[in-house]
Amino acid sequence: MLLLSLLLAAIVAVQANSVEQVFKSHEVVPDVIPQAPNQFLEVSYSNGLKAKEGVELTPTQVKDQPKVEWTAAPSDYYTLIMTDPDAPSRAEPKFREFKHWVVVNIPGNDVSAGEALAEYVGSGPPKDTGLHRYVFLLYKQPGKLQFDEESVSNRSRRDRPKFSAAKFAEKYHLGNPVAGNFYQAEYDDYVHTLHSQLSES
Ligand SMILES: *[C@@H]1O[C@H](CO)[C@@H](O)[C@H](O)[C@H]1NC(C)=O
């Protein structure tokens, strides 16, 4: 029994370590958050592709809102953030970060029952700006909270540039993210469609 607990503890330690390694090797730590979460977040697109561990996906492949899954107590509330620190490019991130998706007051793990402060928009990395990192972060809230940001639709870029997930988390006392994951993407033809969608209002 003791041996089994030690073994389980070792497995958990190895997994936590690998999240940290992946976040550090792609410099998501420290570019986005000061400390890696303990767990990978499950993020899957309806085409079956997963946003994980820095895998490269195309803007076309991530155009629709993914399914995000985690284990939660139904009485807890969560905040989910997706952010791009590489706006307009990783080399010169002068608009760091571009806010892609923010859902707050998610009861348990039912994202659709949360409040979308920023509706999901997929990747729109400009031409010739290389790979961007798209980072998903899940925070456990201390309880149900009142947020003072205005909601942004998926047709607007209002308040999306110059976002900071870490500052947002600090403002609402969310602590470190409990889980996270990320993919990378560079320009493809779909970016044009997304940019026109974002200029509709
Ligand atoms: C934008 O969000 C609305 C829901 O508010 C959704 O019905 C629509 O499909 C979304 N559009 C795109 C292009 O993602």
Image (cartoon, grey):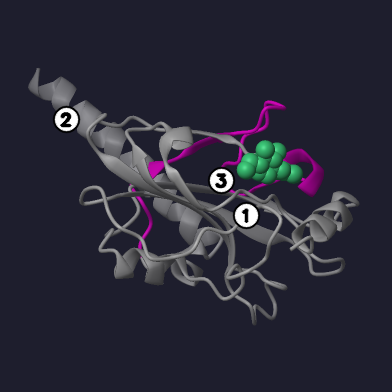
Q: CA distance from mark 2 to mark 1?
A: 48 Å
Horizontal relation, residue 3 to residue 136: left or right: left
Q: Secondary structure at mark 3?
A: loop
Which residue is painted at 60% across and 36% down in the image?
A: 66
Which comes before the other along the chain, label 3 or label 1?
3
Residue labelled with disc 2: 6
Task: Please identify the quarter of the rendering in which residue 162 is found.
Answer: bottom right
Which comes before the other along the chain, label 3 or label 2?
2
Q: Secondary structure at mark 1?
A: loop
Residue 66 visible to an observer of this rendering: yes
Residue labelled with disc 1: 153
Q: Nearer the viewer, residue 31 or 8?
A: 31
Ligand 1 found in image quarter: top right
User: Magenta residues, as a range?
Assistant: 35-64
Which residue is painted at 63% across and 78% down in the image?
A: 95
Q: Is mark 1 within 8 Å of ligand 1?
A: yes
